[in-house]
Image (cartoon, helix red, strand yellow):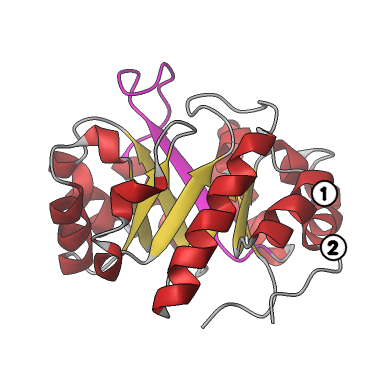
Amino acid sequence: MRPTRPLIAPSILAADFARLGDEVRAIAAAGADWVHIDVMDGVFVPTITIGPQVVKALRPHTGIPFDVHLMIAPCDPHLEAFAAAGANYISVHPESGPHLDRSCRRIRELGAKAGVVFNPSTPVETVEWMLDDVDLLLVMSVNPGFGGQSFMVSQLKKVERLRSMIDQRGLDILLEVDGGVTAETARLCLAAGADALVAGTAVFKGGQPAYAGNIAALRGSESLG
């Protein structure tokens, strides 16, 4: 069943890394539904961010789900570590391993929910024959690897296509968008069929007193019910 309101997943890539635990508590208190954690290895994408030990250290700071996006290759050797660290959702790229379906099945075996991430050039047909093994589809509306990029309007058609695939088959899969999400582009994503929105700068701008208002602005007046 689709959520009755947009799920907001602030990306801690835009948080104050010197006090991540405090930042995670603050976004949870401000109304965030998930914590989005971007894991980058400097190989699959140019940037290096964090690993499972940081995820483990953050887990006691909030009970809301950890939405972990693995931008690493190969991804399979690290799935167990992130699941053990407390990831609720683990999303992988088709390009980061030889057998996407096997990776998704393994994530589920480890007790987490399995997500598939679409780079701007990744076709929707990548998951056409394995949707029963997926819990989350994440459309990148920027090229992965850096925060603060501009939203790619071209990816809205991909969101629409995936929404249609999910609905036609009656599947319980969440559809998420990440990259350049602001209060303005959020409305476009929701109109195209997104259930969840990842936002970094749009949530963390203005410091902790602004987080609740920033999250509310991303939700706007849209309803998915």
Coordinates of residue 176 in the picture (x, y in percent):
54, 56
Coordinates of residue 192 in the picture (x, y in percent):
67, 57
The secondary element bearing badge 2 is classed as: loop
Residue in view at x 48 percent, y 29 percent: 144
Coordinates of residue 83 in the picture (x, y in percent):
26, 57
Distance between the alpha carbons at the discs numbered 1 and 2:
7 Å
Q: Is residue 50 magenta?
A: yes
The part of the chain drawn in magenta is 32-51
Q: Earlier in the sequence, mark 1 or mark 2?
A: 1
Q: Amino acid at mark 1?
A: Ala
- The front one of 70 and 32 is 70
User: Which of the 4 image quadrants contains residue 90?
Assistant: bottom left
Query: Which quarter of the rendering shows the C terminus?
Result: bottom right
User: Which of the 4 image quadrants contains residue 71?
Assistant: top left
As drawn, 197 above or below 184: below
Q: Is residue 64 magenta?
A: no
Q: Amino acid at mark 2?
A: Gly
Magenta residues: mostly which secondary structure? Answer: loop
| Mark 1 and mark 2 residues within 8 Å of each other at the beta carbon | yes
Q: Does residue 179 appear anywhere in the picture?
A: no
- Judging by the rendered image, the residue that carries numbered circle 1 is 183
* Apparent side of residue 91 relative to residue 31 in the rendered image (left or right): left
- Judging by the rendered image, the residue that carries numbered circle 2 is 220
Coordinates of residue 10 in the picture (x, y in percent):
63, 50
The secondary element bearing badge 1 is classed as: helix
Residue in view at x 69 percent, y 75 percent: 224
